[in-house]
Image (cartoon, rainbow, N blue to C red):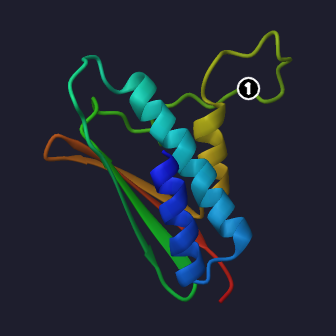
Amino acid sequence: MQRFVTTLTEFSRVGNLPDDVAFSIQLAIDELFTNIVSYGYEDESVHQIEINMAVSDSEIRVDLIDDAKPFDPLHEAADPDLDASLDDRRIGGVGIHLVKTMMDDISYKYENERNHLTLIKKFDA
């Protein structure tokens, strides 16, 4: 994950990304990466998680591609009850909720035995 942070820092500098946008992307990728590694694999095999980024004048697009078991976070992740007390809250779901809240657009598809999650974060040029 440290390699990604270093790459994102350089990518942000070259692409002139605002600091808050870079922070949102880093936080979202960290959350999603952790979920993939923690819940997506049921074996000890070597797996690859691919992160592709593209920046334009007004948005950054991140494509996260993995070979974990199929999981659509847009429809399969339960929304957390943010009004419940900490003792009464179910474990899980807050990270995905945070990602959904921070991004301007998210799409998911399962294709060629891979999860493809696309995140788009807009910003002022």
Q: Position of residue 11 (x, y in %)?
A: 51, 73
Q: Position of residue 61 (x, y in %)?
A: 46, 69
Q: Position of residue 49 (x, y in %)?
A: 32, 45
Quick check: can you spot residue 76?
no
**Residue 95 vertical position relative to residue 118 in the rendered view, above or below:** above
- The residue shown at (74%, 16%) is 89
- The residue shown at (60%, 29%) is 93
- The residue shown at (63%, 40%) is 97
The residue where tag 1 is placed is: 81
Seen in the image, is 121 located left or right of residue 75? Answer: right
Tell me the crowding category of disc 1: few under 14, some 14 to 19, or many 20 or more residues within 10 angstroms, Cα based: few
- The residue shown at (41%, 23%) is 39
Total tally of numbered discs in the picture: 1
Q: Quadrant of the C terminus?
A: bottom right
Q: Position of residue 36 (x, y in %)?
A: 41, 33
Task: Identify the amino acid type marked 1.
Answer: Asp
